Amino acid sequence: MNGQLETAVFVDLENIYIGFRHQYGRDLTADELVEKARSFGSVKFINVYADFSELTYPEHFKIDLDNEGVQAINVPKDRDREGRPTKNKIDMRMAVDVLRTLAFRKEITRYVLLTGDKIFLDVVNLARNDFGKEVIICGLEGTVAQVLKDVAVYVPFNADTAIDERLEKFIKLLDRLERELLEGTYHYIGWKLVIDKLMEQPDFGFTAWAEARDFFERLKRDGRIVLKYYPGESREIEGYRLDRRNPLVRKVLGLEPKSSEPTPAPFSGVPNEPSQ
């Protein structure tokens, strides 16, 4: 979305992150989130609100946001003695910051709220009616309250299809390597084997080995594959398998959803020597 309006972006991360996972079967990346937030014209700042201690988010997610120059604001939830969350203060903190910006940042004329929660209805109406600001609501289809769509400009939050296409190709590649492993073609699936295979297939679009390596490292970090260790003569050897409980993996491979599935057992074959 183009435009020269001075823009502030406020992100209800829990709402967007969980909605994205349910809709696309994979986790939202920090890069995708920041790219979407920066697409709304002349963005002066981006605030992202979440309890980053929760297991919902990868450990590196806040760091990735910090590295992008985004204000990743940690808002811990109140918890009971068993550690279960009892009160969510994130919405309140985000609403207060919107009000503070309305009061003290007169130059901000466009407010973008990445959320679908109707609790922000009064804030949206205040910004539009009392301060004359343009307000945009951006969220996942099916998660945005209709009352928000009725009072503000609505922009759907869509996934980057290029990322999904590359992930689908990778899942099929690793599935094929696992089958070849069981047939005895390989002793184990190591990182060098995977990256070499990524480079061999032109449809992945990698022009440099380091580019394919970075793609694979991101998948490891985001938890889309399962890391297995196999004993070697002098050191442990890293071997990789798909996490077949992952919704995207199950969708791509056509696996029937199950309420529970045991963690895949390690391969019985032990490599004679590393081939990395």
Image (tube, grey):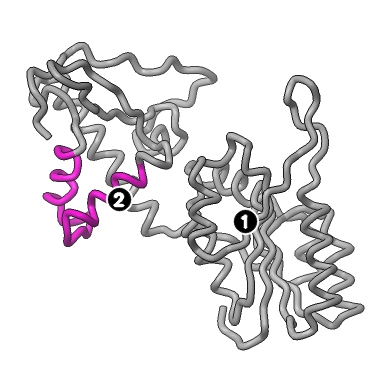
Eyeballing the image, is 26 above or below 66? above
Q: Determine contact: label 1, label 2, CB under 8 Å.
A: no
Give the residue at the far front of this rendering.
234
127 versus 270 height, above or below = below
Looking at the image, which residue is at 89% across and 78% down? 129
Element at label 1: strand
| Mark 1 or 2, closer to the camera | 1
Question: Residue 238's quadrant in the figure?
Answer: top left
Residue designated by label 2: 215
Q: Which residue is labeled 1 in the image?
A: 72
- Type of residue at label 2? Phe
Q: Is residue 252 left or right of residue 57?
A: left
**Residue in the image at 67% along x and 83% along y:** 6
Q: Position of residue 251 (x, y in %)?
A: 42, 37
Is residue 216 found inside the magenta-colored segment of the image? yes
Q: Residue at x 76, y 64 (%)?
A: 149
Taking the view exactly as shown, the residue that stands out farthest to the bottom is 4
